[in-house]
Image: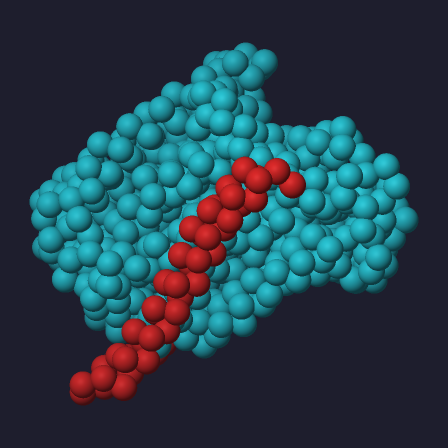
Amino acid sequence: MQTTTVIFMVLVLGVLWGGFVALLAHSMRAEKRRSSGAGGSPSAGGNGD
Amino acid sequence: MTKVESFTSRWALLLAALGMAVGTGNIWRFPRIVANNGGGAFLVPWLIFLFLWAIPLLMVEMAMGRHTRKGVVGAFGRLMGRQATWMGAFVGWCTMAITFYYSVVAGWCVKYLVASATGQLSGVEGMVYWEGFQTTVWQPVFFHVVAMGTCALILYRGVVGGIERASKILIPALFVLMMVAAVRALTLPAAAGADGPMAGVEFLFNPNWSDLLNYEIWLQALTQSAWSTGAGWGLMVTYAVYSHKKDDIVGTAMTIGLGNNSASMLAALAIIPTVFAVLPLAEAQSVLRDSGPASTGLSFIWVPALFGEIPGGQFFMTLFFLALVVAAFSSMIAMLELGVRIFMDFGMTRRRAVTSVAVGSVVLGIPSAINLSFFGNQDAVWGIGLMVSGLFFAIAVGKFGVVRFREELIEPADNDIPVGRWFDFAITVLVPLQFTVLIVWWLYQAATSGEAWWNPFGVFTLGTCLFQWGVVLLIFYLANNRMADATLGDDEPAAG
């Protein structure tokens, strides 16, 4: 495979997969903080109807 | 007032929204489009438009749904004033009209999943099997009903018991399936005369920079971005109704956008290397370009043939169609919920709303199940109509006041990534500009498709787009006050 192809592939996949995984991990940490945080936020989920 | 349901966590909202975004288009359309448009170079505008079209619109939708706590019809009415309810109705109709034939596609995926798992696809010629399936007529209708019924059963169980629970299983499963398929594709041995899977990777990622001077590549990239993430469909409005007040809008929109595009890349890595592992170069390129009837060429005609040539082919073909089914169902759940939410806003119970939407969608999807020309017509008319939907969202924000929208509806959320003034520019300038370019280009395609451009009953003509949009817009415009009364009641509009 050509060098430019490899570099380009790493860049594209890095932005996409790297960004996606980083945001997911961040969401998980934020969720843990929220559920164990001050006052414990009310997890209000429910089927209202 | 009936208490509005809600997801139990931000994580649940994210999974459901990812399911909304990742659909059959990621798996069967993206690989074909990227292969037809220069491979590597296409990825550049495709990524750019993720940030210039999809993510800003997802942010708008999430803010609208969370602020108004109404489905798309009521959201427009509450945000812009009762007189604008018809705009939300058009957005909702575009998506529902797509749902009618999307269910047909989901049915095809179920059929092929069953066929691959039971060995029916082994050794058969792809086009022969496809035509045999389609010409029975009853089979496409039957599987369309199966797909719709399965999604309806999930929706009967509500937001937490249905949508959230299904999403927590379907979405991780989908990503695992696609990763397994991609790893398998990349490790395939090259068949005699073929160049091997790495030739497919080269084909996918080799950036021929001069291709970026071709305007068509930019238009195809914008179209794929507009259609693939679900931005501007009203789906994120619907799910945002069930979100928590402080849920991160910016981070959620970016996660959905990047997740959707990540899934597309996984699918491309599963399919394109497989093609190059099995077929000689010229034939591989030809297969990737052949869209087939109703864009079925790669998925339903070539995949059975290709997977028949690889070790463990039946198993991996079954995995492929299972991934398609999972992707289709996770998106269909969101699309049907859009209609359910609207009907619930009108005062129906969930049970009645789901039954009405499901039965209506089955009936209105039957013409697409039995006639592929009609299917193609609906795909064109409402697919292009989605671009009008995107513009309507930009207009809604403009009417409310874009700075006010950002400061009052987006910034108060617990956004881990701050939203800057780039958002104002994206919504007021870039989205309308992109819409204008897209709509002109696609209507030009329709006008020069080879059929009489004015024909309102053509498969892909300017006339059929304008005729069908016109009828729908007129009906909703005339019914505006009734819809506003039904969905808003005596609410004061939060007009700009």
Which colouring convention does the figure follow?
Answer: by chain
How many dots with numbers? Answer: 0
Q: In the shown orientation, is residue B7 left or right of residue B265?
A: left
The quadrant in which the N terminus of chain B is found is bottom left
Chain coloured red in the rendered structure: A
Name the one closer to the observer, B251 or B151: B251
| Residue B205 image position (x, y, % from top left) | 57, 39
Q: In this view, does B295 lie to the left or right of B440?
A: right
Q: Which of B447 and B415 is in front in this view?
A: B415
Q: Can residue B52 be seen in this view?
A: yes
Q: Position of residue A27 (x, y in %)?
A: 34, 69
Residue B240 left/right relative to B267:
left
Q: Please, which residue is most extreme toward the front here?
A: A3
Q: Residue shown at 27%/42% (left/top)? A: B393
Seen in the picture, residue B331 relative to B291 is either above or below; the reply is below
Res B467 visible: no
Q: Quadrant of residue B191?
A: top right
Measured as percent of width and height from the top left, residue A21 is found at 43, 63
Q: Which residue is located at x 49 percent, y 68 percent?
A: B167
| Quadrant position of the C terminus of chain B in the picture | top left
Q: In this view, does B348 lie to the left or right of B101?
A: left
Give the residue drawn at x 43%, y 48%.
Answer: B229
* Chain seen in cyan: B
Which residue is painted at 37% across and 73% down in the image? Answer: A28
Q: In which quarter of the image is residue B318?
A: bottom right
Residue B46's place in the image compared with B268, above or below, is: above
> Residue B199: x, y in percent?
70, 40
